[in-house]
Every structure is written in C-alpha cells, then in structure tokens.
Amino acid sequence: MTAIHFLLRLYEKEVIGYELAFAKVKILERVGRYHPDIIRDVLRKIGEGREDKMAVLSLRLSKKEVEKIEEIARKENKKKGEVARSLLSYGWIFLNLKRYKEGKISLETLAKELELSVSETIDLLAEYGVTSPISYDDYLEGLETLKQLS
C-alpha cells in the first residue's frame, strides 16, 4: 500500500480529519512522487460527502442512561457513540410507527420519514405487527367518495 492510499484509508476510517488529510495530500503533490490523476482522485475522495460528516451534539444524560449505553456497547462490542446513534435511529423509527398507528401520519408520509419505499414500509409495518389505523368501513367510505368525485 502506498503512502497516499494509506492516508486515504486513515481518513476514511476517521482516524484523521479532512484538514489534515487534505494538507498531507498537498504535500505529497508538491513532492511530485504521484501522478496528478492519482492526486486528483484522492482529493476528490477526501472531499466527497464532506457535508455528510457527522455533527457533534452535546447533551446531558442521566447516569442510568449512560450505564445502559455502556451495557449495550459491551454486549454488542461496539463503541458508545455507535450505540447512541443506533438507539436514536430506532427511536426515530418507533416514533414514526407510533404516529402512523395513531393515524397522525399517512403511509406515504411514514415512508418518506423513514426514507423507504411504500412497499418496504408495508413490510416493516407487518414485521412489527402494526396495523392500519383506518378501519375497513372507513376505507370503503373513502373509496365511495372517490368514485363520486370521479
């Protein structure tokens, strides 16, 4: 593995940040050891998705909440940050499933919120046993209204 590819890997694994990776590639470019196309490709890869990098959020957690995160991290052999992000993701899914079940959002809105297709969303609802908040009678009534409007 060459130095420039090792540098790229360190950046991708988030061992080093954007500024340091960019500066080091620029140094390698000045040395002239690498072909300009390689330098350009590595700089492009370093710059890609930069706006998608994770933000830092500071929040206060109770001792019990921290202990739960640490327990899950230990059991799943993950970092605490990964566990916290995973729990937030599951919480987002749960919140939206609950809103759908209560009839506060439509199937289409649920799919958009979860960034899934409608068919994937229906599969998810079935997996978690969530039924439609609309009764069969309401469905028939809506269908009849739609026919009258057409």
Image (cartoon, rainbow, N blue to C red):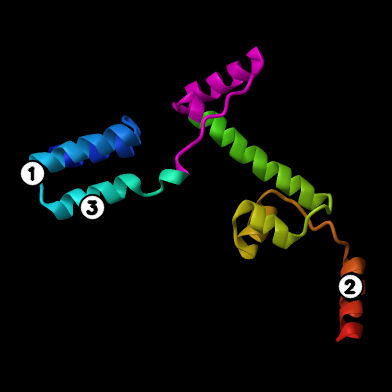
Magenta stretch: includes residue 70: yes
Instruction: Answer with left or right where residue 19 lies relative to residue 149.
Output: left
Residue ID at (23%, 52%): 41
Query: In this view, which residue lies farthest toward the front?
Result: 30
Task: Find the distance from the CA under tag 3 to the CA under tag 2.
Answer: 55 Å
State which quadrant residue 126 falls in. Answer: bottom right
Q: Which residue is mark 3?
A: 41
Question: Does residue 150 appear left or right of residue 6 in this picture?
Answer: right
Q: Which residues are magenta?
A: 52-81
Identify the residue position indicated by label 2 in the image.
142
- State the image coordinates of residue 37 (x, y, percent, origin top left): 16, 55
Q: Is residue 125 above or below residue 142?
A: above
Q: Amino acid at mark 1?
A: Gly
Vertical arrangement, residue 135 with respect to residue 53, above or below: below
Q: Residues within 10 Å of mark 1 (few under 14, many from 20)?
A: few
Residue 67 in the magenta stretch? The answer is yes
User: Which numbered marker is on residue 8?
Assistant: none
Task: Kindly report which numbered mark, 3 or 2, lies closer to the viewer in this rendering.
Answer: 3
Q: Residue at x 54, y 25 (%)?
A: 72
User: Which element is circle 3 on?
Assistant: helix
Sequence-earlier tag: 2 or 1: 1
Q: Are marks 2 and 1 in contact (CB under 8 Å)?
A: no
Q: Which residue is mark 1?
A: 32
The residue positioned farthest toward the left in the image shown: 33
Circle 2: residue type? Gly
Q: Position of residue 89 (x, y in %)?
A: 60, 40
Name which of mark 3 and mark 2 comes first in the sequence.
3
Q: Residues within 10 Å of mark 2 (few under 14, many from 20)?
A: few
